[in-house]
Image: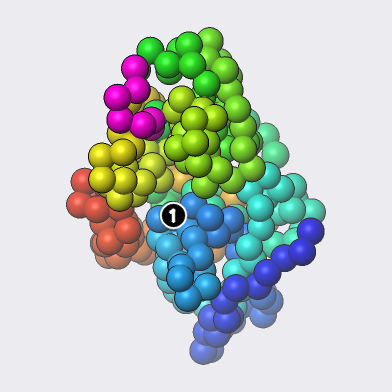
């Protein structure tokens, strides 16, 4: 699959060690605001882009961003097409059977059902629910009596609700919040539900223990000095859970 390199490398002065000698490629979807997305200037931006760039700078890593479709984001990591994933990915037990995870950089995010205003909440159990494929929300919806429709991208799940293909969408609440806030009352939350997983984390190949340790050290620094919490509030608002 064609990959698009979207950012210039972050060059660290005086870098040392094996990791600093190589390019570390960070895979992301580029279609999941405010975590990662393409802005009007065709630039890759978002919370994870700012965070990833800062982690690389602190770790003296030379880093590049690689955009990849969500459906193949884990297989392409395992295949070596990039070295880490930062794409709003929760560290779940099922994923941990295939890849490793860093410490979380965002605390577990609840999921939510979003629908058109006036929708009967009973559709969460009896209606048609849209979810992005290969997400934990798709698995959650599949475990209910509702009819699940999966889409390759998150934007398509929103469109399905707006055009009547689906009664509601189930996704990360923080992702859906932007759409609710910008819809002028057209879209509303029906319910918030707990999500599985230890929190949003960097995905890595299970053999890359040194890289995982490097990222964890940089994350620890950002948690200790408050800069990670500042980024969380910048991108998700003052109500977002932060690290103590």
Task: Say whether residue 115 is magenta.
Answer: yes
Residue 32: x and y in percent read 49, 52
Q: What residue is pinned by disc 1?
A: 33
Q: Quadrant of residue 177?
A: top left
Q: Residue at x 51, y 89 (%)?
A: 13
Residue located farthest toward the left when viewing the structure as drawn: 238
Q: Is residue 179 left or right of residue 226?
A: right
Q: Residue at x 60, y 27 (%)?
A: 149
Q: Residue at x 66, y 57 (%)?
A: 68
Residue 106: x and y in percent read 39, 48
Q: Nearer the viewer, residue 190 or 91?
A: 190
Against 91, is 236 above or below?
A: below
Q: Residue at x 26, y 45 (%)?
A: 184
Residue located farthest toward the bottom when viewing the structure as drawn: 13
What span is in magenta?
114-120
User: Can you see residue 210?
Assistant: no
Chosen colour scheme: rainbow
Is the residue marked by circle 1 packed among few (<14), some (14-19), or many (20+) residues within 10 Å?
many
């Amino acid at each position: 699959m064609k990959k698009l390199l979207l950012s210039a490398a972050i060059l660290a002065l005086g870098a040392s060690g094996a990791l600093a000698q190589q390019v570390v490629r960070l895979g992301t979807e580029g279609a999941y605001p405010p975590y990662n997305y393409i802005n009007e200037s065709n630039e890759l931006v978002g919370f994870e882009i700012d965070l990833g760039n800062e982690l690389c700078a602190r770790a003296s890593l030379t880093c590049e961003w690689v955009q990849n479709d969500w459906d193949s984001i884990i297989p392409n990591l395992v295949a070596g097409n990039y070295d880490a994933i930062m794409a709003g990915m929760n560290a779940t037990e099922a994923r941990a059977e295939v890849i490793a995870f860093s410490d979380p950089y965002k605390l577990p995010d609840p999921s939510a059902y979003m629908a058109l205003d006036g929708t009967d909440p009973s559709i969460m159990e009896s209606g048609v629910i849209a979810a992005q494929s290969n997400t934990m929300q798709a698995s959650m919806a599949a475990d209910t009596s509702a009819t699940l429709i999966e889409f390759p991208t998150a934007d398509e799940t929103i469109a399905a609700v707006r055009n009547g293909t689906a009664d509601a969408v189930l996704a990360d609440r923080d992702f859906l919040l932007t759409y609710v806030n910008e819809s002028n009352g057209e879209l509303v939350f029906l319910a918030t539900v707990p999500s599985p997983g230890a929190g949003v984390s960097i995905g890595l190949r299970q053999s890359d223990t040194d890289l995982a340790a490097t990222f964890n050290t940089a994350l620890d620094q950002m948690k200790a000095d408050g800069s990670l919490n500042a980024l969380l509030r910048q991108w998700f608002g003052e109500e977002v859970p932060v690290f103590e």
